[in-house]
Every structure is written in structure tokens, then in C-alpha cells.
Amino acid sequence: MQVSETEASVRRGLFSEGRGPILVLICAGIWLHAADMTMVTTVMPGAVAELGGVAWVAWAWMLELVGAIVAAACGGLLATRFGIARMLALTAAVFALGCIVTAVSWDMAGFLAGRLLQGIGGGAMLALCNIGIAVYFPDRLWARAYAAVSLVWGVSALVGPLAGGLFAEIGFWQGAFWLFATQSVLIVVAAPALLRRAATQSRGDDTGVPVRSLMFLVSAVLVIGVASVVEIWWISLAAVLTGIVLLAGCVNADRRGDVTLLPGRSLGVAPVAAGLAMAFLLALSTISFSTYGPLLLERLHGMSPLEFGYLAALESVAWSLAAMLVARWPFDETRCIRVGSAIVVAGTALFAYAIPVGSLTLIILAATMQGGGFGLCWAYVIRRTVTSARAGDRERTAGALPTVQMLGYAVGAAAVGIVANGLGFAEASSNAAIDRQIAETVAVWVFLAFIPLGLGGIAAAWRLARP
């Protein structure tokens, strides 16, 4: 196929004038954060078997996501105040420290502390790398540079679970974290050398950090997370209700604040509110497979971490293939948003049947439905939500979508823990038959309990897709 002169020029421009190594560095930073978030899925069974603390499984996801959200919100200010090179090296060092703490932990408390540090370092790296594209590449190359970043996200979603599964398969789950720590040290060394112009070229947002909104958000997620490990039901219920009130406080703070996490001026615009609600609710209702899928499949059917890694990779492949399909051929935007959201929720419902009975065919189908449903609708969700925002709010709206999605995953992880632990999953039993019965019950309800929220996501999708 013949490549146009303009396209060839753009490709050369990505790697000319010393930009090639910078692009590799940026992609490496994004790879560390993205692959680390998926890798933990397949190492959790081994970590729990060695460290204990099964009641805290959901926190391994929740704390990393909370750290990532807070750090990403501070990325622009850090880049402007201290320069991209210095901060990228520092945050990569924080990430490496988190990996080391996780790898050498002798109990679940240390493991979770390491996950929090990984989230802080990874979230900041993600923000700094995205800012770096705007700093080091001319406008005409941004589309190509972000396309490369998108490819890295896709590869990380595919390779991350497999990498974790390989180390877990040989009984050395810590090796996955040592591998990522080593890679991050390379960024610590390379960033100052490759990003020498950062101090003079940084274009980060120096308007400040949404401190009030972040305080409400972090408090809300942590309070809901506490509910997942409290055995007294009325305290757990009170914690959940308090968390919901704090989330509402976060939205209210964003409406009133000058510096916000969300596009405050556009929250009253119906398509924007619907798009953000859809991202939050669908993320919340689909996190169960990643958090408890490996443990349930291991306990019920003896599935190895590597085998689960292939299932997680299949979900990512389905997302990528569906996204490529809608990008190549024009489909009706309204139908893609509505049908895609319905397929995602249907996949969640299918998991509730497939995992307890152990049908590999149905589990594969459910994973494909979840990934493919997101791939079918996500690009259109972003476009319609962002283009509906008010003038001057589009960039903030585009940035709010992944933030809200991460928040949904964090809250969802805490909520899944509430369901699983409430059904007795964390309690040890000397009776294998009772253990299996509890696991089968949990395998149903960690999915079915979130169908109503998934239906809320579908409702938001229909509202977003209105002509």
C-alpha cells in the first residue's frame, strides 16, 4: 500500500530531531502504569495464599486507583512548577519504591502500602507523559503520538495479565513487581537526559489542585472500602451511606470551585452528565471479574493464574477489535452507544452463571461481551460527551472521563469487597464443602448485585445517545 507524502513526513517527524527516544520514554511511562494495573489481577491468588488477608483483596485495586486519581490531578501543577524531566524521574522512583515494597511484603498491609505507592507514581507518570506529548511534539504530530500511546494501552492490557500469570505460575509472584521496578529505574535514569527542555517548555496547568474535591473523593472511597472489611452490618451500611454523601460532596465542591476535577460548568448539560454517569456506572458494575475472578476460578475450578491471564487478555483483545471495527467502518453512533452498553451489562450477567458452573466457553463469551461492548461504544461516548460540553470546557471534559472511570473502578472494587466478605468469603473454614458452597454463592452475587447499577449505566447511555 502506497503511503502519502504527508503521512510519510508525519512518521519521520515523530522520530526526527531527537523526538524518537522521547516518544519511547513517554510510551514506557504509560506502559508501566497501564500494565501494572492489569498485572495485579493474576498475581493476587498467589499473594493471598502467601500473605493472607483475603478480606482486603479489593483494596489492592482500590488504593492504587485512588493514588492514581490524586496524583494525576496534580500532574499539570508538578510539571509547571518543577519541570517534566525532574518530576517524571521522581514519580518513576516512587513507582519503583512501591513495586519493591509490594515484592518484599510479609503481610497484606505491606502489600497494600506498596500498591498505594504504585498508584501515586503511576498516576503522576501518566499525567506527565501526556503533558510531555504537548511539550515535545508540534501540533501536527499530536494525533500520531497519541495513537502510539493508545497502542501501548492496548498492548499493556494484553501483556500485563499474562506477565503476572507467568510469574504466578512458577510460584514467584513477587517477580512481576521486581520486573516493573527494574523498568521504572530505567526511566529514572533516562528522563533527565532525554527531557532536558522540560523546565522551559512545560505547558502544565498551573491553576492549582482541586484539593477540596480530592479530599471528598478520597474520603468517600476509603469509607466505602472500610465497609468491605467491617463485620457488623449496621456499621458497614452506615459507612456506605457516608461514602455516598461524600461523593455528592465531591460533585458539589466541583460545581462551586475554581479548580475542579470535573467540568463543573458543563455538569448541568444533559449529554455531559449522562456520559460521565455512564462511564462511572459501567466501570463500577464490571470490576468484579478483575478483582475476584482469579480467586473464584482457582477455588472452584482449579484454574491457574496464567489461564486467567489469557481470559483477561481475551477481554482486552475484544475491546481493541471492536474499537478498530467501528473506526474503520461507519456505524450509527446512537445504536453503538446503546447496544454496546447493553452488551457490557449482559456480559456481567453471564459471568454470574458461567463462573459457578465452570463453563469455559461461557466464561470466554462473557469476557468477550464485556470487552467488545466497551470497544463498540467507547469512542462514540467520548466524542458525544466532549462535543456536548460548553465552550472552554471540552479539554476538562475529555480529562474527566478517564478520571470518572477510574473512580468507578475504585468504588466498585470496594463495593465488590462488601458483597464478597458479607457472604463469608474471607472466613476460613475447615470444611471444604462449606468453603465451596460459599465460593459458589459469592461467584453469583459479586456479579448479580451490580446488575442494577449496570442498568443505570444503560439508562445513561440511552440519554447520552438521544438525537
Image: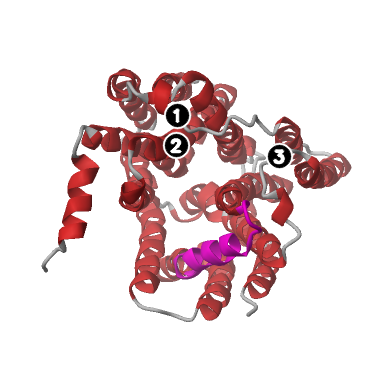
400 over 43 or under it: above or below: below
Which one is earlier in the sequence, the residue at label 3 or at label 2? 2
Q: Which of marks 1 and 2 is in front?
A: 1
Judging by the rendered image, the residue that carries numbered circle 1 is 202
Q: Nearer the viewer, mark 3 or mark 2?
A: 2
Q: Is residue 386 magenta?
A: yes
Horizontal side of 368 relative to 285 (left or right) equals left
Residue 30 in which image quadrant: top left
Q: Label 3 vs label 2: CA separation?
A: 27 Å
At numbered mark 3, what does the secondary structure look like: helix, strand or loop? helix
Judging by the rendered image, the residue that carries numbered circle 3 is 221
Judging by the rendered image, the residue that carries numbered circle 2 is 131
Q: If the image is split into quadrants, where does the N terminus sit?
A: bottom left
Q: Does the magenta stretch include residue 296?
A: no
Magenta stretch bounds:
373-393
At numbered mark 2, what does the secondary structure look like: helix, strand or loop? helix
Looking at this view, is 172 or 347 the one in front? 347
Which one is earlier in the sequence, the residue at label 1 or at label 2? 2
Residue 441 appears in view: no
Horizontal side of 125 relative to 262 (left or right) equals left
Looking at this view, is 96 or 229 the one in front? 96
- Tell me the kind of residue under disc 2: Ile
Residue at 21% of width from left, 45% of height from top? 13
Q: Label 3 vs label 1: CA separation?
A: 32 Å
